[in-house]
Image (cartoon, grey):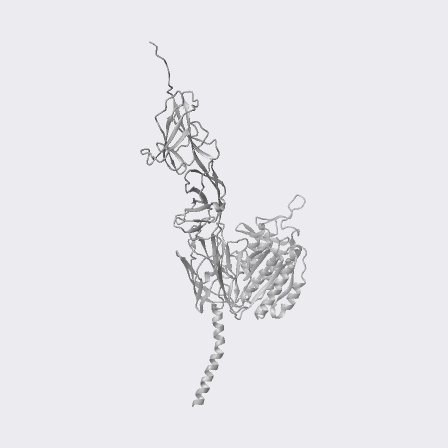
Amino acid sequence: MKTKLVRNVCALLLIICLLLPLLGQSVQAYGDNIKPVYTTDDTGTYPTASWKPTGQENVINHQGGTVSGCDNNTNWSGDPSDTTNSYLKHGNVDDPDFMIRKFARETATPGTFDVFLNVRGNSVRQEKTVDVVFVVDTSGSMGDSERLDNVKAGINDFIDNVEKAKLGDNIRAGLVSYDDTAIVQENLDTVSNNGTSLKSTVKALEAGGGTFIQDGLYKAKDMFSGSKSDEKMIILLTDGAPTYSYRVESAISEGGEVYGETFDYEKSEGIGSSENFPSSFFWDMTYTVDGFKIDSTWPATLGEARNIKNSTDIVINVLGISIADKYSAKMELLANKGHYSRQSSSKGIKEYLESQADNVISSFDTIKNGSIVIPLGEQYEFASEQVGITSVGENELSRLEAPWAKEYEDHIDIGKINLGKGDEVQFHYQVRLKTGTADFVPNKWYPMSGETVLTADEIPGAKFGIPSGKASGTTIDITKEWKTFSQTELPENIGFKVIRKVAGDDEWQTAGGVLTAGDKWQKTFDKLTLADGQEVALAKYNKLGVDYNYQVSEETAVEGFNTKIEHLGENKWRIINTELGLQVEKRASPSDAKLDGAEFKLVKYSDEFVTEDPSFNEKLVANSKDIMSGLKNGHYALIETKAPTGYQAEPNALKFSIKNGKFFDEANNEITATNLEAGQDGFYLNFSNDSAYILTGVKYNIRQIVKFKLNI
């Protein structure tokens, strides 16, 4: 009995040991095997393995990859229609169960970012067949820039990938090449049978001649005759407009484009060097069919593609290689909707064919009852009103229950994600950095969201990579210039205030800084200080992407000095402090001649022109070139104490005050005049000395003493 129990326990342990690896594989296949990694340092928080959209420096995204590691793709355009780059591929490395990605790119508005999430169902192998016919342009231009070489490499990799996926019996492949005419190079057969010969045939292709796209499509279509495969596809590769076509016998117009419907396949047309037919008095190849003018190879070429798309279940995929913009719209019409691609580089041809191999190899995958929660990043706010949802896979999502997405103030909820083979959905929303807040730091990486996780039936949690964004800062350059005429002592430092224009209600608008003698009164500031002592950085633009306007508005007043603030250019300012001075003039009326010999005393009040300060006692000589210095804030009066010879002293005082480097008259009006009317007592500013801000008091005397002798 005891021996039997031991045997049973050992058997149970053996079963558990056998199951453990399988259990581990199951967990790994459902999303727990890829965990995005981030770095946090002085520059912020960002994906450790990262890529940036071409030409953009303010956004950084998590690389794609598998359980084996990241893809090391550090740069691509970030075009959301590109569904080949930066996916996290969960499950089997060679045959992922599903793929996800999250990336961002900066919009034309600085600090605002488009964010995209893709969820793609991927391959779960089944017993099905797929037919693929490569229709390859071998015209003369395909010899340029290694285009044909990359086609060969791409098809070679296509076949290799099919064999690696062990789908050689499920996928049939064929090859048509075309230049002045089309040739069936390899008939459709399983890759297991013809893979080697197809690669050899492709390797032998040479470039030369014109571009007969229609003939290539026509002969490719015939290769599918009698096919019972589940999927049929043409992969058409071309680097130019068609230069040959078959004669159109009937035609229609759709969407403003003329399409041939039937053709004379015994008669080809075209000049081999252009898509346009000659049309002149001496040579006119144009003609009219069903009321439509046929003046180029396009109606026949587009019509052939249209017939294939409308009358068969063949899907036409088209790669335009370095296609001129003027041909893009027509090239796109050759392909089934969503199946046209452009590549500007020869290397992109190989990448395109690799992506086509991925699409063919993928069978179907199921993501059932999927949901995603996207918490908003702390330094961001939503810039979009709703989440865009787009089907970007081979299949339209209309056959499925469409996902939904709802945007809240601080997060996004997404639900009802049901994706199978060929299904891919892309979610799009916008965020913008709150650059105006007091805690914003320029050029610091801020994650655009919190942890974002896909959960679904049998997927406990697949984490998206989180992109980070940053925004530029700026600086303000401030110089102080002291202008003095005396030996007055200067302060060691001085404060100033900066106003930030184009600031929102939730953004700081005023801050201050300090210039010091130790800095030689010049400094470039990238940070200022708020009234509560918090240090704030200078953002270049606000959250709407509008440049801030930083203005030096005032400085802490220095007693005895006038302050002038000059704007020298973009974010460059100069503060000029000119020492205050005082002079007095004595003039005769009505001649306005200066009268020498007068003396004045300067009285200072301890209040507003009522109580004299007995400790203050200064004397000025009228019309002297000497300038009185050491003037401080307060109320003053100039009182004549000695009149010029032959005149009587005027009893009325000239009263003024000094406040924060400015002069005011008795009525508290700032004195700004630079001259006075003749015969008028008062003050004016005298700028004859560049190092002094001089207030000049003027006193007129009209009463001359007349001496006479009375004789009786």
Instruction: Give the quarter of the figure containing the C terminus.
Output: top left
Of 26 and 297, nearer the camera is: 26
Question: Which residue reaches farthest left?
Answer: 610
Seen in the picture, residue 226 relative to 567 is either above or below; the reply is below
Can you give x and y, in whole percent of width and height, for residue 491 in the image? 44, 43
Instruction: Give the quarter of the figure containing the N terminus.
Output: bottom left
Can you give x and y, in whole percent of width and height, for residue 367 in the image? 46, 66
Which residue is rendered at x = 45% and y = 54% of the image?
430
Can you give x and y, in whole percent of width and height, for residue 195 in the image? 62, 68
Of 694 and 318, nearer the camera is: 694
Of 503 and 609, nearer the camera is: 609
Question: Which residue reaches farthest bottom?
Answer: 1
Can you give x and y, in whole percent of width and height, for residue 136 in the image? 62, 59
Seen in the picture, residue 436 relative to 185 is either above or below; the reply is above
Number of disc labels: 0
Asked whether residue 230 appears in the rendered view, the answer is no
Which residue is rendered at x = 41% and y = 51% of the image?
534
Of 168 and 9, nearer the camera is: 9
Asked whether residue 70 appears in the rendered view, the answer is yes
Seen in the picture, residue 459 relative to 606 is either above or below; the reply is below
Which residue is rendered at x = 42% and y = 47% of the image?
511
Q: In which quarter of the view is residue 143 placed?
A: bottom right
Residue 283 shown left or right of residue 82 in the figure: right
